[in-house]
Image (cartoon, coloured by chain):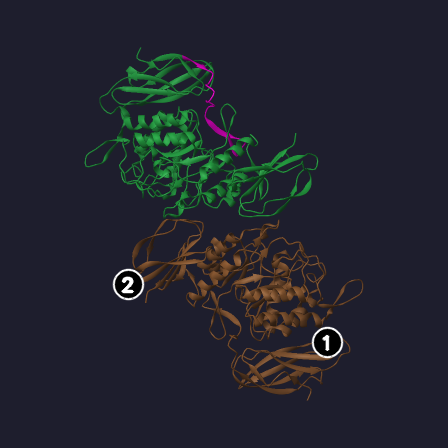
Chain colours: A green, B brown
Amino acid sequence: MNGQTISDRIERWGLYEVWLTGAEDGNPFLDVRLSAQFKHKHRVVEAWGFYDGDGHYCIRFSPDALGAWTYVTRSDCSALDGETGAFTCVEPSPANHGPVAVCNTYHFAYADGTPHFPVGSTCYAWTHQGDDLEKQTLATLGHAPFNKLRMCVFPKHYVYNRNEPLYHPFAPAGAGGWDFSRFNPRFFQHLEQRVGDLCQLGIEADIILFQPYDRWGYSTMPTEADDRYLRYVVARLAAYRNVWWSMANEYDLMASKSMSDWDRFFRIVRESDPYQHLCSIHNCRCFYDHRKPWVSHCSVQRSDLSRAREWREAYGKPVVVDECQYEGDIEQGFGNIPGWELVHRFWLGTIAGCYVGHGETYRHPEDILWWAKGGVLHGESPSRIAFLRRILEEGPPEGIEPISRWAGGREGEYYLFYFGVHQPSIWTFDLPPSARYRLEVIDTWAMTIAPVEGTFGGRFQVALPGKPYLAVRIRKAG
Amino acid sequence: MNGQTISDRIERWGLYEVWLTGAEDGNPFLDVRLSAQFKHKHRVVEAWGFYDGDGHYCIRFSPDALGAWTYVTRSDCSALDGETGAFTCVEPSPANHGPVAVCNTYHFAYADGTPHFPVGSTCYAWTHQGDDLEKQTLATLGHAPFNKLRMCVFPKHYVYNRNEPLYHPFAPAGAGGWDFSRFNPRFFQHLEQRVGDLCQLGIEADIILFQPYDRWGYSTMPTEADDRYLRYVVARLAAYRNVWWSMANEYDLMASKSMSDWDRFFRIVRESDPYQHLCSIHNCRCFYDHRKPWVSHCSVQRSDLSRAREWREAYGKPVVVDECQYEGDIEQGFGNIPGWELVHRFWLGTIAGCYVGHGETYRHPEDILWWAKGGVLHGESPSRIAFLRRILEEGPPEGIEPISRWAGGREGEYYLFYFGVHQPSIWTFDLPPSARYRLEVIDTWAMTIAPVEGTFGGRFQVALPGKPYLAVRIRKAG
């Protein structure tokens, strides 16, 4: 028996691997087809395998049901075909809630039903910076409020990003070029390690499959190389429960790709991914048509969060405003807003029933900007974002729905008013008269929560501090 | 000879009056038609007269050319017809620059060529508050930065505006109603006094002819009463050089008026006004089509000043954003932004080549809110608006044209960068390489202007303080 598995007991939504040994000659990335059919009772799930170099082949699988599973491999290479095995799927460990999926139309939940309120950040090229900085990034994330991280597979070429990556995704060809038909397993092993590290920290890896900032040719590969790359990445990474797919960062800046390319990429990922992970695409100027059936949620770049509700309504899916400009002081307009403005945009998006993402771009003597390379956080927004995350987690588990220009929540049950720059010193609330509610005045910047004495119902006025960036939380009494 | 004039020497753009005595019986407001033809060399200008009560009739005229003028009256009442007179138009006093008109497509200038950069405020109902408060308002305006004031002819009924006006524009009819065919001269004499007071202070009176906030019936008069009212107001006020006409405040909230009513009102005012004063109309939600030929400039309500340039381009006329929400702390969203946010909006509009207006709505124990009743100013924005006005007056006399997202000015000559909430700590400027420029870093809130050492040209980088609400002024050296 060729098959070698890591363990015969695997936790639900954990990572199971079947390792096989096979041909090294020719080009196994092109020549060998490998998959396995995993069977639980009468249900069969097929997962694609991948070549990991040096004659090593692997099929990864993440079981979603408790109990006995068996598998049988399928390959056009006889040494890899027909291998069988069995394992038992056991209860997940306490921190493992499974992969995140869309829930309640505009919101998210883990597979075990725990709500997931995305509070994301962005470190586009963090996995290309070498061990020291990558470990520092992980240490920072261990104490940061973020539960999702946008990160590119490919290295990044851009302002503040001139360093060469540690690994390249393809084997070198002559004249500084790359052989797009031969992947570099070391590159992907490293990427997987980092995705796994994030999983350990409870952070979703929002994996960006293509992006325009490139000097190596990864943004302009031929069609068959693009498609093969997608299948390879999905075969390697889909079994990590914390994976989200992002077809691209700023897809609309990639002149060499057409809209039908993007549509095809979505179909390839959706066809290849046994778990149907969350799947979106991020714009620069023009939104992709998120109504298309393969898009699970909107991943948008826009700075005017007062319009967030429009996008919800336009697409009928969860809206994650992953980029609404970053806290920082660089010259580029996307990266020089103050922390309080970013926090303001988080709150605007929140009461509109959307989710907002963080990034940080303070200039650094060694060009280590969080948004690209990770490292440590310097800004004033993360602590306030942690505060907002706490508010979200104390709120309705189904998520916040937009109620009015000033408030989101769950009609009759929970209201989160947010006044932004507006500084009323009095406010008239109009709640259902049949119930009683408790009010708290929240200073979103000072991170204070001050209860208002008494209980309230119907139409009533409350004095407010008359300063900007206040919120009022209203919850049913008793 | 019936005619009685104030003087036989009148300054250019001053106010000349012909007073006549005629019929008191019947309804002179309806029955008597009166005008005068004023003649300067071969040129003839006809101005309408008005009945001022007690048998007094008046024709007002504002001469725009120096030298000898004669006039002859025309009336269907023989006692008022054929009266003649003469006067000499002399050089204006130093503070008299004549009426304001559109200049350079998107800007304004007084008739003597002096640029006018509108820096307006809003006291909708200030002339209805009685002498004490009105004099306090005038005293405040004497030290405030504003050179234009939006004010309604009719009294206002609204939140914080429940008091009865001192005078009513019409004669009382039975049952608390009004005889719309009989004006109350005392009302208009008082209004004129206030318009004249503003003129003395160098402030343009942006006179709002209709508005929706009404409990007396002035917003729902019959068609013929509307039209007669307009002609009467124009006959009385057009000779004041500081008059601007605003057909309405929030015309789109007046359900009883159709778009063809508004178009007719414009035509009536334009046909009746010998001086073709600036003429616009102010929206709540929906812009009037400012491309219509009788509109001199756009008078708009919008809070998102980052879009100001769009409106310039859409209408091809000067844009005055008279209402972009007010500094204050009331409950209504239009009246509770902090001073710094209002100042920010002023700057955004300025670099877009537009003009922005002020208002103030801080709660007051006696409901005396500047935006409606005048009084004194409490806010933090007026001093910063004065600072901006100084910047404008030190800038290009032709006005500021939008240049980029970040800057307005005159290409090659003058640039005013404004970074808003953005806080770059470095900036790359790209100026014509053939000239040398001096730079100043402006803190729009602290009201400081710090020169940057040296002269600059071409493409160069400058370190900036890395905080929000900074501007950079660039002027040609030497």
Say which amino acid is labelled 1. Gly
Is residue A288 found left or right of B381 in the rendered image?
left
Residue A268: in sight, yes or no? no
Task: Name the residue tied to disc 1.
Answer: B53
Could you tell me how far apart the alpha carbons at marks 1 and 2 are, in whole angstroms?
A: 68 Å
Mark 2 Cα shell of 10 Å, populated few (<14), some (14-19), many (≥20): few
Q: Is residue A94 magenta-colored?
A: yes
* Residue B249 in the image: above or below residue B71: above
The N terminus of chain A lies in which quarter of the figure? top left
- Residue A28: image location, x then y, percent: 26, 23
Under circle 1, the secondary element is loop
Q: Amino acid at mark 2?
A: Ser
Region of the chain picked out in magenta, as a range? A87-108
Check the picture and name the quadrant holding the C terminus of chain A: top right
Residue A333 image label: none
Q: Secondary structure at mark 2?
A: loop
> In the image, is residue A79 part of the stretch drawn in magenta?
no
Between residues B458 and A76, which one lies in front from this camera angle?
Answer: B458
Closer-to-camera residue (B406/A461) = A461
Q: Give the percent coordinates (x, y) of residue B392.
A: 45, 64
Quarter of the figure with residue A177: top left
The subunit letter for the residue under badge 2 reads B
Question: Based on the displayed image, in which of its 4 quarters is residue A435 positioned?
Answer: top right
In the image, is residue A284 above or below residue A118? Answer: below
Give how far across and how far down residue A395 sits, in percent. 56, 32
Q: Compared with residue B81, is residue A462 higher up or lower down, i.e. above or below?
A: above
Q: Is residue A306 left or right of residue B424?
A: right
Which mark is on residue B434?
Answer: 2
The disc numbered 1 marks a residue on which chain? B
